[in-house]
Image: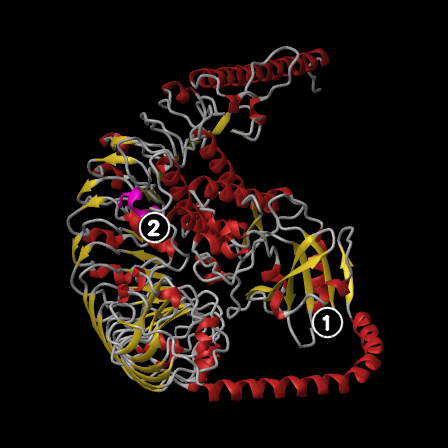
């Protein structure tokens, strides 16, 4: 018979295990609470160590009545059970103290971010990710950094680190990302590398010397390799050409020699290849675009030679081709001229031969082919080059006449055809050169008269027609030019009064038939004005009398017919227009339409003419006429009206107010508040002239745009853009920020105009096409030309260019040879130029110097080629306001202890701003 254990035994055993479980749970909970309390105490200790800064005011002690869980603080991330700190982020917080050693009491901490501060670094040994970029670190990288064996991601860029790169750093086998760019590191790159998992390696902009270690050719996972802006010498290791994961390869601005590895691009997904400004020789590798992904080929300023690889003619991914200042020869592959996405075609200063193509890719903005041996005529099909902004074909062997079609390029700002063999007259009818700034036709064989049409070009400022065979008189209606050269021609007559001053003392030399009323021009003095003959005067009087009588009779005969038709036509005309008001108005569409006369035109842009129309009560309004004499696509019209309606609800003091929209089947009129002082570009770049009617007061032309006004304008624009980006229910991107879209009222307060027009005027299906470029040359963010993706950061880039214009006085596309202003500024920063020498001397005074340097640096930050490194418009606005308050003229600073802009502050010993990425 089987005997079972008593039931009390079973119950006792169950109770025993239950008690054990309860006790273990209690111990675990007790330990968890203890760890939580300990870490909370550490965090409070950190706050105290940082002197209780305002940005940590929400870090408060726990109490029995509070529910203050530190895992809910925005700077903290905890484990999934919410008991232990694993991440601490205190970036951009103006911290100046050293990282305290007791931070290691956060036992599970694996991520720490103290970037954009001013802290010295102490030893941290157990981290996987360590970011201390732009923290003003100085001194040498400690040798024992190699003890951080778990480190995977190290960013110590943009600091003041000196000394060599510790060899132990390249022995960290888990390291995948290493950024040491923009320091003052010296010596050679370590030759022993065990960090074979590296994916990104950036050592750019240091003082590294010696040869590139061959062992780097073993980094099979490397996708980004940047050793640019150092003093490296020797050859590029042949193994680099076979790295299978390579995407971005940058070695520019070193002293590298020898030939390029022949296998580059054959086994990788190469997208960026930048080796400019070295002393490389030989041919370009044949397979750079083998996988059809190459975006940027930049090899200028070398001794490369031979013909271009024919495979480049099939490289439709290519966006930038910059191979100038080399010794390339032969014909340019025909497919390059028509490459679908190519934006910058820059091949000057080589030995290329052949002729200009009949067809050119519609995506090309910059066509620079000067100082080659190209021949033949400029084709009549040049009219299809519709998006070209810069066309430089100087110093070639081009011949024939300049075709009329060349004047139809609407976006052209720079045309350089000097030192060729062009003949015949200039086209007398200039169709679409309203954006032309520079025209140079020097040293050709051009003849005939200088066309009066040149005087109607609104922004032309540099004109060189010297050393030709022009005859006739100097046009009296030439625009206000900053540079004019008509010397060595066969011109006759008197120099116009506007040019009779010392600024043009060499502009008219070697024209024996020219005279002047002033000896400053080194020309013969003119005689007194000859009297008209009596016969001529009599004939003129008779002609005028006949014309007046004929006109009177015709008017009399037509009056009855006009009066008969007037009422009917007026009714039909008024009914064809529809006014959509966005606020209460005291004018009608008839008031506006009757003022759309040629006399009231005050400007023109890419979207149409702009009128200054007088109206009751409002004084004046500005009317932008969109489209002209063509029927609108219905979808486009509906989309346009929807966007206009949305923009009409925007109310901000720094955005031009849209009053109403008037439309019919063929045109749309946008009616805005009128801005007395027109646009910023007219003041900043002195584009106003006597004919300008953008102010009701003549005295306004004598107002000087000094630095305080410029800073006021910058802050106003930033306020408008920040509102559109951050304070609307849906962010609105302007897409075409530039000085001509910044308008000024009577007190020079800035208002942003044309919000949304760049998008509204696209036809359906155009938005993402590669041939459709939104924006203006010199202001377009580089990532937009590559992806056509619209983000707020493209506005930040454009605004950065505006800041550079405000501080330097230069125009957006005026960055010296081959460069935009943004590229020019970055290049000067990279070579360590003294910023003071780059500023606008017209407004720079000792009391403004620090402020102007700060705003210049901010402009450089905003024009970073990496969108992710640009600040937001809200951050830009804060920096400008801090700058204004910190340098407040004649008043106490409104800022307290935390009044420094972390991204911009330099130590007194530093005279330059280090930057993140390179061009």
Q: Secondary structure at mark 2?
A: helix
Residue at (77, 59) in percent of width and height: 580
- State whether residue 638 appears in this view: no
- Residue topped by disc 1: 634
- Answer left or right for 678 relative to 351: right
- Of residue 19 and residue 512, the one placed in the foreground of this image is 512
Seen in the picture, residue 840 relative to 879 is either above or below; the reply is below
- Of residue 34 and residue 862, the one placed in the foreground of this image is 862
Give percent across and percent down for residue 139. Answer: 24, 30
Give percent across and percent down for residue 480. Answer: 42, 63
The residue segment tinted magenta is 833-840
Whether residue 839 appears in magenta in the rendering, the answer is: yes
Give percent across and percent down for residue 657. Answer: 66, 50
- Residue topped by disc 2: 826
- Of residue 750 and residue 275, the one placed in the foreground of this image is 750
Seen in the picture, residue 49 relative to 439 is either above or below; the reply is above
Q: Residues within 10 Å of mark 1 (few under 14, many from 20)?
A: few
């Amino acid at each position: 018979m089987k005997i079972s254990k008593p039931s009390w035994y079973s119950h006792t055993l169950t109770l025993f295990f239950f008690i054990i479980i309860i006790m273990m749970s209690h111990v675990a909970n007790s330990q968890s609470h203890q760890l939580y309390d300990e870490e909370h105490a550490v965090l409070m200790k950190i706050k105290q160590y940082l002197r209780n800064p305002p940005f940590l005011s929400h870090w408060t002690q726990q109490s029995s009545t509070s529910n203050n869980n530190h895992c809910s603080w925005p700077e903290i991330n905890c484990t999934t059970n919410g008991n232990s700190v694993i991440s601490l982020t205190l970036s951009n917080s103006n911290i100046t103290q050293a990282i305290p050693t007791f931070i290691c009491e956060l036992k599970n901490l694996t991520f720490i971010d103290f970037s954009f501060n001013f802290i010295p670094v102490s030893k941290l040994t157990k981290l996987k990710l360590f970011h201390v970029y732009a923290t003003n670190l100085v001194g040498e990288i400690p040798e024992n950094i190699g003890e951080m064996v778990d480190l995977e991601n190290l960013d110590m860029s943009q600091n003041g680190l000196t000394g060599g790169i510790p060899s132990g750093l390249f022995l960290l086998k888990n390291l995948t990302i290493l950024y040491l760019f923009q320091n003052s590191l010296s010596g050679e790159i370590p030759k022993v590398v065990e960090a074979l998992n590296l994916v990104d390696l950036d050592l750019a902009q240091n003082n590294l010397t010696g040869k590139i270690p061959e062992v780097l050719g073993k980094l099979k996972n490397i996708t980004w390799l940047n050793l640019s802006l150092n003093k490296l010498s020797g050859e590029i290791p042949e193994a680099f050409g076979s790295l299978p994961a390579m995407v971005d390869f940058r070695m520019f601005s070193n002293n590298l020699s020898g030939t390029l590895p022949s296998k580059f691009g054959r086994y990788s997904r190469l997208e960026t290849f930048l080796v400019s400004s070295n002393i490389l020789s030989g041919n370009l590798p044949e397979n750079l675009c083998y996988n059809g992904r190459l975006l940027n080929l930049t090899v200028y300023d070398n001794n490369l030679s031979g013909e271009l690889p024919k495979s480049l003619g099939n490289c439709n991914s290519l966006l930038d081709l910059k191979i100038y200042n080399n010794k390339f020869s032969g014909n340019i592959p025909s497919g390059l001229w028509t490459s679908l996405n190519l934006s910058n075609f820059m091949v000057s200063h080589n030995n290329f031969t052949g002729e200009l193509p009949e067809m050119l890719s519609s995506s090309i903005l910059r066509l620079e082919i000067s100082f080659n041996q190209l021949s033949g005529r400029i084709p009549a099909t040049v009219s299809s080059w519709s998006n070209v902004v810069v066309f430089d074909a100087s110093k070639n062997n081009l011949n024939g006449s300049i075709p009329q079609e060349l004047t139809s390029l609407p976006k052209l700002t720079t045309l350089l055809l000097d030192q060729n063999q062009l003949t015949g007259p200039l086209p007398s009818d200039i169709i679409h050169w309203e954006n032309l700034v520079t025209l140079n036709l020097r040293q050709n064989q051009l003849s005939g008269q200088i066309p009066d049409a040149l005087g109607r070009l609104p922004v032309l400022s540099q004109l060189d027609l010297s050393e030709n065979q022009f005859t006739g008189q100097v046009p009296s209606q030439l625009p206000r030019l900053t540079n004019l050269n008509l010397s060595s021609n066969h011109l006759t007559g008197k120099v116009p009064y506007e040019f009779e001053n010392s600024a043009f003392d060499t502009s008219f030399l070697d024209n024996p038939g020219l005279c002047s009323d002033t000896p400053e021009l080194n020309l013969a003095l003119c005689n007194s004005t000859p009297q008209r003959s009596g016969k001529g005067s009599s004939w003129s009087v008779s002609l005028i009398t006949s014309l007046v009588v004929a006109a009177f009779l015709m008017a009399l005969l037509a009056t009855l017919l006009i009066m008969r038709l007037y009422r009917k036509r007026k009714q039909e005309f008024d009914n064809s227009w529809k006014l959509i008001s966005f606020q209460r108005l005291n004018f009608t569409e008839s008031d506006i339409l009757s003022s759309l006369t040629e006399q009231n035109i005050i400007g023109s842009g890419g979207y149409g003419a702009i009128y200054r129309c007088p109206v009751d009560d409002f004084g004046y309004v500005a009317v932008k006429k969109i489209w002209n004499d063509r029927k609108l696509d219905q979808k486009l019209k509906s989309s346009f009206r929807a966007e206009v309606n949305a923009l009409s609800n925007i109310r901000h003091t720094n955005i031009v107010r849209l009053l109403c929209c008037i439309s019919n089947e063929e045109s749309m009129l946008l009616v805005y508040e009128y801005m007395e002082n027109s646009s910023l570009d007219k003041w900043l770049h002195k584009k106003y002239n006597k004919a300008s009617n953008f102010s009701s007061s003549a005295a306004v032309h004598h107002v000087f745009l000094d630095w305080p006004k410029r800073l006021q304008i910058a802050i106003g624009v930033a306020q408008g853009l920040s509102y559109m980006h951050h304070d609307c229910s849906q962010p609105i991107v302007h897409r075409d920020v530039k000085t001509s879209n910044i308008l000024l009222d009577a007190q020079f307060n800035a208002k942003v105009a044309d919000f949304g027009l760049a998008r509204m005027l696209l036809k359906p299906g155009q938005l993402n096409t590669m041939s459709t470029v939104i924006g203006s040359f010199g202001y377009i963010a580089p990532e937009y030309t590559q992806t056509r993706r619209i983000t707020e950061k493209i506005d930040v880039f454009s605004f950065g260019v505006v800041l550079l214009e405000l501080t330097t006085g230069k125009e957006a596309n005026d960055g010296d040879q081959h460069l935009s202003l943004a590229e020019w500024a970055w290049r000067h920063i990279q070579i360590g130029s003294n910023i003071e020498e780059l500023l606008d001397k017209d407004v720079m005074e000792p009391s403004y110097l620090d402020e102007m340097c700060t705003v210049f640096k901010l402009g450089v930050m905003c024009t970073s080629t990496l969108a992710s490194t640009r600040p937001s418009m809200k951050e830009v606005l804060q920096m400008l306001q801090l700058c204004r308050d910190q340098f407040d003229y004649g008043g106490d600073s409104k800022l307290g202890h935390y009044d420094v802009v972390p991204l911009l502050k330099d130590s007194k010993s530093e005279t330059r701003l280090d930057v993140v990425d390179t061009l």
